[in-house]
């Protein structure tokens, strides 16, 4: 068997685990970026000002909503529970962040890269689901 054929067979064998890599990447980044605001709220006023400067309506409320969507969504992704619904909500959050703030605000590609990566990572999970190493998969196996 040729090397490429072996690699293809190996990749196919473990393909169900691929969403786990995306889940962990997105979840860790979101937890890292939102945990302090979720638990202390110290950065919320600055985040609300940032949103207001970019024309986001109700910036005070939406700052809290965005922080908790990111934090709770990240926890759900990390354990692999209710991944598709959580990822759908994150897609909405990061559509606003990327298109409504970074693109319309004229930011460079790199300035909006985190939001774009979270948007595309979440969209990927909407399409793929949680993958084999998840509570969703375990729940489906029990049914």
Image (cartoon, grey):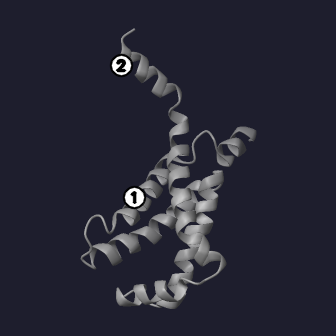
Q: Which mark is residue 48?
A: none
Q: Mark 2 or 1 closer to N-term?
A: 2
Residue at x 66% of width, y 52% of height: 79
Location of residue 129 in the rendering, given as x and y in whole percent from the top left corner: 54, 48
Location of residue 29 in the rendering, given as x and y in whole percent from the top left corner: 51, 60
Residue at x 53% of width, y 64% of height: 30
What is the quadrant of the N terminus in the image?
A: top left
Drawn side of residue 125 relative to residue 51, left or right: right
Contact between labelled residues 1 and 2, with CB atoms less than 8 Å apart: no
- The quadrant holding residue 27 is bottom right
Residue at x 28% of width, y 73% of height: 103
Marks 2 and 1 sit apart, C-alpha to C-alpha, by 29 Å
Which residue in the rendered view is the most extreme toward the top?
Answer: 1
Residue at x 47% of width, y 91% of height: 58
Front residue of this view, candidates 126 and 51: 51
Location of residue 117 in the rendering, given as x and y in whole percent from the top left corner: 39, 58
Q: Mark 1 points at which residue?
A: 117
Q: Name the residue under label 2.
A: 4
Which residue in the rendered view is the most extreme toward the right?
Answer: 142
Total labels: the figure holds 2
């Amino acid at each position: 068997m040729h090397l490429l054929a072996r690699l293809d067979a190996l990749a196919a064998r473990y393909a169900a685990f691929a969403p786990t890599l995306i889940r962990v990447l997105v979840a860790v980044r979101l937890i890292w970026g939102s945990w302090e605001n979720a638990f202390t709220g110290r950065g919320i006023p600055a985040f609300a000002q940032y949103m207001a400067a970019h024309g986001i309506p109700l910036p005070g409320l939406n700052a809290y909503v965005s922080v908790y969507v990111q934090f709770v969504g990240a926890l759900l992704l990390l354990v692999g529970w209710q991944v598709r619904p959580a990822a759908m909500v994150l897609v909405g959050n990061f559509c606003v962040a990327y298109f409504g703030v970074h693109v319309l605000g004229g930011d460079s590609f790199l300035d909006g890269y985190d939001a774009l990566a979270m948007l595309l990572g979440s969209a990927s999970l909407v399409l793929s689901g949680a993958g084999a190493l998840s509570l969703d998969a375990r729940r489906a196996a029990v049914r």
